[in-house]
Amino acid sequence: MCKRDSGYLVLFLSLSFLLGVEIVVYHFLRLELPRDHYLTTLPLSLCIFSFALNHKSFNSQNPAARIGRKYSSYVYMYHPLVIKLFSFIPFLGTSILYVYTQPVVVFLATLSGIVIVENVHARIRPSKQKPGP
């Protein structure tokens, strides 16, 4: 790990800790934030983005890059539907674990649904064969 990588790691861990403290403080003070945008969200996002841009290991063959390239628009379009579907499950809204892991759960559920639909569609769609000579 080079010096620059350790700097990103320290910054990432510091911002993550501050984000956790900020969430606890807002929860303790019973403050409602519109759309859960915290003060440390933007700096943490910029830290992660800068780290990814400065590392050649995050190339186009990286699984995260392939998933992003292939499915990001579908995740963007369908995640509100998944959130709405999850709102019909009564115990999820009261689960403190779900409240704090909702972005990851919704992303993974949306991605899983998209992959399932894609696989089902590939199986029922007739394969296009070139006509013979």
Image (cartoon, rainbow, N blue to C red):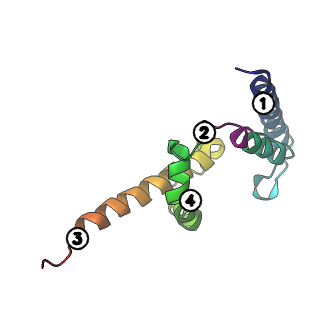
Q: Are marks 1 and 4 in contact (CB under 8 Å)?
A: no
In the rendered image, residue 54 lying in the magenta stretch gets the answer yes
Q: In the structure shown, which secondary structural element does the residue marked by tag 4 occupy?
A: helix
Horizontal side, residue 92 vs residue 128: left or right:
right
Describe residue 14's horizontal placement relative to residue 100 as left or right. right
N-terminal label among 1 and 4: 1
Residue that label 2 marks? 97
Q: Earlier in the sequence, mark 1 or mark 2?
A: 1
Quadrant housing residue 6:
top right
Name the side, left or right, on which 45 lies relative to 127.
right
Amino acid of disc 3: Ser
**Type of amino acid at the residue the image marks with label 2:** Leu
**Residue to which mark 1 is pinned:** 8
- Tag 3 and tag 1, C-beta contact below 8 Å: no
Q: Is residue 94 visible?
A: no
Task: Characterize the local packing of mark 4: few (<14), some (14-19) or many (20 or more) Cα atoms within 10 angstroms.
Answer: few
Residue at far front of view? 133
Q: Quadrant of the N terminus?
A: top right
Give the extent of the magenta segment.
Answer: 51-58
**Location of residue 33 with respect to 46 vertically, above or below:** below
Q: State the image coordinates of residue 11 (x, y, percent, origin top left).
A: 82, 30
Label pair 2/3, CB-CB below 8 angstroms: no
Residue ID at (50%, 43%): 63
